[in-house]
Amino acid sequence: MAHATQDRPTACLALADGTLFYGKGFGATGETTAELCFNTAMTGYQEIMTDPSYAGQVVTFTFPHIGNVGVNPEDDETADPVAEGMVVKWDPTEPSSWRATETLGEWLTKRGRIAIGGVDTRRLTRAIRQQGAPHVALAHDPEGNFDTAALVAKARGFAGLEGMDLARRVTCAQSYRWDEMRWAWPDGYTRQTEARHKVVAVDYGAKRNILRCLASVGCEVTVLPATATAEDVLAHKPDGVFLSNGPGDPAATGAYAVPMIQGVLDAGLPVFGICLGHQMLALALGAKTIKMNHGHHGANHPVKDMETGKVEITSMNHGFAVDSQTLPKGIMETHVSLFDGSNCGIRMIDRPVFSVQHHPEASPGPQDSFYLFERFAESMAG
């Protein structure tokens, strides 16, 4: 009997349609409900788990070797994991990296995040692609006792991300200054001491590496909370305004963000937006956003720059998209996904106001799109 107990699953993932996946739990115990998405990146699981854009989501990793390089404080994109939980193919091994300070399991346990290993992630990913991002309940119990009917009911009871303003949940509590630049060998992170441009970054769930990229192109960055008004932003007398990434439904966050963005546009300042910031800039300019079937989450998404014809391989993380059919006159579509043709960038034809759906700071992923930060800096110098 002892042998049978040993093999008993210690975690259960229940989908709202009643499908159950069993596996081995690690990280924190307990249960959580969320939307389930999949991420195809081969690196950067720590950055993904700490990316505020994943609020309200459990992430399935299609790459099997998750946990193999452990975790370290330098790779956090925000103070704590924001994704609700993680689903992986294989149980994490002992980390093999000189940078590791603890194991993935220890890190998740300390920070109250649940994970399940030993799952057929390929089957799960196919289900997400075919049926859309499902609502799920994820439970971890070392004793292996699960009330599956209750878990399915909890998954069905999850409100979903449509109509949810999650930016308020992950934004900063108060404004702060940022001067740390991108990580570079051998010094690691260094400080920006010769800033040429004053930038206000509005934090809807900003990743630290976006702020580092702004500092690296010569910006003195002041970060304001998501609910900042146009008056709050303009009081800092910035040379330009940055709209960050973030979670949830852009239309819900747009209820307070759009009037602020319109006020900044009226002031004639250069504006650059990424991800949720891109979607809300589009809303402020008169376009609409839509919920995608399963979104884009990965580090190998080909995006075509419509103006140069160049193709960039990009990092993506979004479940909503700008509907390019609704772009008003005077707004140009600048980037398009080569996976499905969805909108990945816009700009005003006559002003330095532009945004992209993908993540030019990467972290994880390729850095093909870093030039966008340089373009923003040049627009403030002009």
Image (cartoon, rainbow, N blue to C red):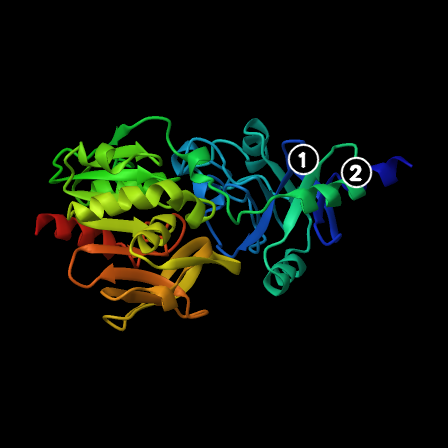
Residue at the extreme left = 382
Q: Name the N-terminal-most of marks 2 and 1.
A: 1
Residue 168 image point, x, y percent: 43, 35
Residue 53: which quarter of the image?
top left
Q: Is residue 341 above or below residue 247?
A: below
Mark 1, residue position: 31
Q: Residue at x 23, y 43 (%)?
A: 263
Q: Residue at x 16, y 42 (%)?
A: 218
Residue 297 image point, x, y percent: 48, 55
Residue 179: which quarter of the image?
top left
Asked if residue 184 can be seen in this view, the reply is no
Q: Residue at x 81, y 38 (%)?
A: 6
Name the side, left or right, on which 358 lies relative to 144.
Answer: left
Q: Residues within 10 Å of mark 1 (few under 14, many from 20)?
A: many
Residue at the extreme right = 1
Residue 110's label in the rendered image is none
Q: Residue at x 67, y 43 (%)?
A: 157
Residue 118 image point, x, y percent: 69, 49
Name the side, left or right, on which 198 lies relative to 203.
Answer: left
CA gap between label 2 and label 1 equals: 10 Å
Residue at the extreme bottom = 309
Asked if residue 251 can be seen in this view, the reply is yes
Mark 2, residue position: 146
Residue 91 image point, x, y percent: 65, 44
Q: Residues within 10 Å of mark 2 (few under 14, many from 20)?
A: some
Q: Nearer the viewer, residue 152 or 128?
A: 152
